[in-house]
Image (cartoon, rainbow, N blue to C red):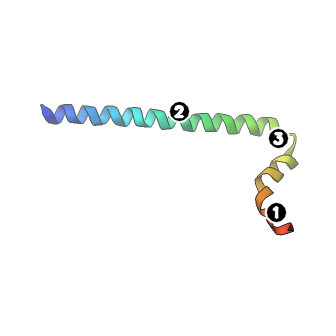
Amino acid sequence: MCEDMEDSHSRRFLVIFCARHWRLGWWHFMLLTFLSHYLSCDCQLLALYSEGGASGAVQS
């Protein structure tokens, strides 16, 4: 009886844990999709944003 309760508790924890991480991952995915959609017409800005740190260090 105790083993069954412990198993169901750990299973419930795993479900909650996965749900939270899935929701966080989904939010990041939607944010990236939104940004890429609206920045697709301005690819130079996106390239500068992604390379900004490295190119700035090389030039100076």
> Dot 1: what SS?
helix
Mark 3 in CB contact with mark 1 (< 8 angstroms): no
- Identify residue type, mark 3: Ser
Q: Position of residue 29 (x, y in %)?
A: 63, 38
Tell which of 8 and 53 is nearer to you.
53
What residue is at 19 percent from the left and 31 percent from the top?
5
**Residue 44: percent from left, percent from top:** 87, 49
Q: Nearer the viewer, mark 1 or mark 2?
A: 1
Provide residue 55's location: percent of width, then percent of height: 82, 63
Which of marks 2 and 1 precedes in the sequence? 2
Q: Which amino acid type corresponds to the residue marked 1 in the rendered image? A: Ser
Compared across the picture, whether 31 is left or right of 26 comes to right
Name the secondary structure under disc 2: helix
Q: Residues within 10 Å of mark 2 (few under 14, many from 20)?
A: few
Q: Mark 1 highlights which residue?
A: 55
Q: Amino acid at mark 2?
A: Arg
Find out whether the residues at labels 1 and 2 contact each other: C-beta distance under 8 Å: no
Quadrant position of residue 28: top right
Residue receiving disc 2: 23
Mark 3 or mark 2: whose residue is earlier in sequence: 2
